[in-house]
Image: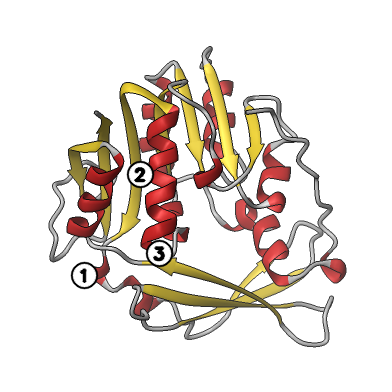
Amino acid sequence: MAETDAVTIAYDPPSLDGETLDALLYDHLNSWGAGDDFYLAEVMAAKRVLDVGCGTGAILRRARAEGHGGRLCGLDPDPAMLGQAAVSDAAEWVLAPAADAAWRGEFDLAIMSGNAFQCLLDDRTTADSLAAVRRALADGGRFVFDTRNPAAAAWRSWTSERPFAFTDPLGEPMEVSQRASEPDEQGVVTVDAYFTASYWDEPLKASCGLRFVDAAHLDRLLHAAGFAVEDRFGAFDGRAFDPAASGSIITVAAAV
């Protein structure tokens, strides 16, 4: 696949819709954490890496800065996210959804960090995406990803009791609050974020869906796509996965 000509979108709040604003503020509101350390270690140990749903490319950019000398490629369907990544030449950047990935046997490792797996909102999209990731991996390659465990019901803590106040990249005061629904019949939770600042007369709304799938369902989808689960953790510190209590389902799967 060819490297994208990703468009860099200016941070100009009065001109943006809610989803684009949310994407442009992602790195501003989300600091590097334990999950990023976990994936960085995986990336540094592999020669050819595909980051599926790479967002702003933070993990691949850090890997290159820390001396990764192999192939790094980031794939994401969001122009606002990928436009931020493409400012850097640390990796190849490709604008496309996971299911449209057309590589064949070119990578030793694929990652999907930051619960990006939950943006696959139904079994058909998930199956198509997993099949594309499997094709992109060489035999014996590994796919490492995380998703939230539905048993922990994280969405019940996402509706804001009070807005979160911060200073935006232009130095202006801004607040954001959230509302989250209960899962629908497909396990999809709708999350609405409301941004308030002097740029707008009323809050700017960003909405997204996140699907919650249990480990048994994940394993059926992985098996059908040609993967075998090698390991599973319940947190990024390596603790064992507990289906009833773990907040995360962190999966290491081998391409078979």
Rounded to the nearest whole Å, what is the CA distance between mark 1 and mark 3?
Answer: 19 Å
Q: Between disc 2 and disc 1, whose residue precedes?
A: 2
Q: Quadrant of residue 16?
A: bottom right
- Which SS class for mark 3? loop
Rounded to the nearest whole Å, what is the CA distance between mark 3 and mark 2?
Answer: 17 Å
Quarter of the C terminus within the rendering: top left
- Which SS class for mark 2? strand
Residue 110 in percent (x, y) is at: 41, 33
Q: Is residue 47 visible?
A: yes
Taking the spot 44% from the left edge, 39% from the top edge, the residue there is: 132
User: Which residue type does callout 1 highlight?
Assistant: Ala
Q: In the rendered image of this protein, does residue 254 appear above or below residue 177?
A: above
Q: Between disc 1 and disc 3, whose residue precedes?
A: 3
Left or right: 14 as drawn, with respect to 4? right
The residue tagged 1 is 151
Q: In the rendered image of this protein, does residue 140 appear above or below residue 147?
A: above
User: Which residue type does callout 3 highlight?
Assistant: Asp
How many neighbours does mark 2 have within 10 angstroms: few (below 14), some (14-19), or many (20 or more)?
many
Name the outermost residue toward the top.
69
Q: Between disc 3 and disc 2, whose residue precedes?
A: 3
- Which SS class for mark 1? helix
The residue tagged 2 is 145
Taking the spot 30% from the left edge, 42% from the top edge, the residue there is: 225
The residue tagged 3 is 122
Left or right: 127 as drawn, with respect to 255? right
> Which circle, 3 or 2, is nearer the viewer?
3
Q: Nearer the viewer, residue 130 or 204?
A: 130
How many neighbours does mark 3 have within 10 angstroms: few (below 14), some (14-19), or many (20 or more)?
some
Q: In the rendered image of this protein, does residue 253 appear above or below residue 241?
A: above
Q: Is residue 53 visible?
A: no
Residue 137 in percent (x, y) is at: 40, 26
